[in-house]
Image: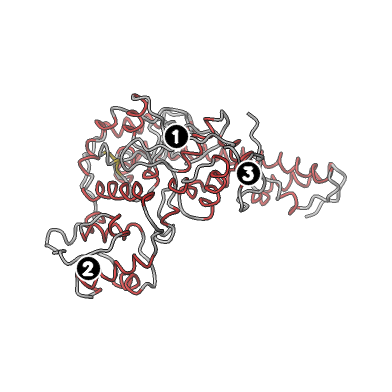
Amino acid sequence: MNLSANYSLSFSYLYQLPLIRSEPYQPECLTSFVTRLAEAHCVSVSQLISKTITPQLEKIFLKNASGRDLKSLFNRSRALNAHGIMAEDFIQALERLTLHGNLSFLTLSTWKNVFIFKGLLRDTKAWCPLCYQKWLISKQEIYEPLLWTISEVEICHIHQTPLQKYCPHCFREIPWLTWHIRLGYCSNCGFWLGNSSYQQHNTTSLLNSSSWDLWIAETVGELLAFTPNLSSLPTQTHVKQAIFKAINQVTEGNIAAFSTLLNTPKNTVWGWYNGKNFPSLQALLQISYLLKISLKDFLTQELDFFNFIPSSNSLFLVSKNKQRSSCCVFDENQVEIALSNALAQPINLVPSIQQIASNLGLNRRLITRHFPDLCKALVTKRRQYQHIRHLQTIDRCCEEVQEATRILYQRGEYPTEQSVALLLSKPSYLRYKQVRKAFQQARHALGLMSQA
C-alpha cells in the first residue's frame, strides 16, 4: 500500500479502526491505536508515521519525514498518551486521516488542566501477562490500555497481580513505540509477553500488594472510563475549591493538621489551598483515598465532606504506601538460577542486576550482598558489551562523517564541522579523536584544506 499524505475529506484515508475497550475501565491508549493502525495497513509503525502522519502534523517534531529521524520521537513516545502538544497534534492528524472524532479519549488530553505532566506517565511499557493470555485464548484483539501507561498504577485490577515491566525473556524494558513493534510481543527479542502461569510465580508479590495499590488501579480506571461522559473539561478551579472545602470541613481550616493526615509538607498543602501550585496525581489520589471517595467524584462532582469522620485506623492509610513494604521470601536457589541464566545470555542480552531484582520482586542490594561474584561477573559482561557498542558507534560515525563530507562537497558546499554535524545521527561524537581524524581524512581526500 502506498501511503501518501493526500486524501479526500469525503472518506477515511486510513481505516477507521474501532476503538477497543475489552474490559471495564480499560480504554485503549493512543500508541496502541497507532500500532494497530500500522498493522492493519501492513506497514511498519515507522512507515506509517514518517510517510502519512508526519505530513499532517501542525508542529515540527522531526527534522524531516525519514524513518531514521523517528528515534527522537520514539524516545518521547509516552507523551503521545499524555496531554501536551505532541498528543494533541497527533490526535488532530489521526482524526483527519481516519475521520474518528473521539481519539482524544485515548490520551489524557481531557485532563490537561488538572494533571501535572511530570511523573504522570511511565517511560516504558507495563503490562499484565494474564490479560494478554486471556485475550489471545479468547481470540480478542491485543491492545494496550491507557491505564497501563499511568505511573501510579502498579497492579492489574482485574487479575490483582503486579504489572510486568521487564521482558521475562531478555530482561529488557520495552518502549511504547519502535520502528517495528507488535502488540503483546517484546520489541527487543520478539517473544510473547502473555503468560497463564504468571499469577503462580507472583504469589509473594500479590500478598504484598496493598489495598492502596488495588484502589489506585480501580479508581484511575474508573476515571478514564468516565472521561467520554464529561459535559465540560475539568479545571484547576474545581480542584482548588475541592481542596479548600476539604481542609475547611475536615480539619476546620487547619492546614497543618490536614498535611499531617496526608503525610505531606505543610507548605505544599498551603500552596494547594491558596492556588499557588497544584497537586500531582499521586497527591490527588492520596486526598481522595483519605476522604473515602473516588477520584472521579473528587474531580467532577460537588462534594460534601461533613460525614467524614477520621479514625485512628484510617488517618494514615495513605502514608503506608510510603513505608517500606514487607519483606519478600528470599529464595537463594531461585536467585542464583536467575543470575546464572542471565550470565549465560549472549553478551547483547545480559540484563542489569536491577532488572533481575525487579522481576524477582527483590531489592538489588540484597542480591548483590548474597551473590557478589555472580553480580560482579554480570556487571563486567555488560560493560564489555557497552564498550563494544561504543566502538561500533564510533566506527559508524566515521563512515557517516566521510559520507556527509562527500555529500556536502557534491552540493558545492564547503564541509565544515558544523555542516557535517547536522547530517550525523550522533553529532556529539565529533569530539572523539577517531571521528575527527576521519573528518580530516575525508576532506584531505577531496583535496580540501584541513583545519585543526
Lower position in the chain sequence, tag 2 or tag 3: 3
Asked if labels 1 and 3 touch by Cβ distance under 8 angstroms, the answer is no
For disc 3, the marked residue is 69
Relative placement, left or right, of 57 versus 231 is right
The Cα atoms of the two marked residues, 3 and 1, are separated by: 28 Å
For disc 1, the marked residue is 350
Q: Residues within 10 Å of mark 2 (few under 14, many from 20)?
A: some
Mark 2: secondary structure: helix
Any part of residue 351 in sight: yes
Any part of residue 373 in sight: no
Q: How is the image coloured?
A: secondary structure
Observer-nearest of 244 and 176: 244
Lower position in the chain sequence, tag 3 or tag 1: 3
Location of the C terminus (image quadrant): bottom right
- Image x and y of residue 287, in percent: 26, 61
Kindly identify which numbered label has been placed on residue 308.
none
Relative placement, left or right, of 132 versus 291 is right
Instruction: Give the residue type that dot 1 points to.
Output: Val
Instruction: Give the residue type that dot 2 points to.
Output: Thr
For disc 2, the marked residue is 260
The Cα atoms of the two marked residues, 2 and 3, are separated by: 49 Å
Which numbered disc, 2 or 1, marks the residue closer to the eye?
2
Instruction: Give the residue type that dot 3 points to.
Output: Asp
Relative placement, left or right, of 95 versus 358 is right
Observer-nearest of 321 and 343: 321
Which numbered disc, 3 or 1, marks the residue closer to the eye?
3
- Image x and y of residue 175, in percent: 47, 41
- Image x and y of residue 418, in percent: 73, 54
Q: Residues within 10 Å of mark 3 (few under 14, many from 20)?
A: some
Asked if labels 1 and 2 touch by Cβ distance under 8 angstroms, the answer is no
- Image x and y of residue 313, in percent: 12, 58
Determine which quarter of the picture holds residue 70.
Answer: top right
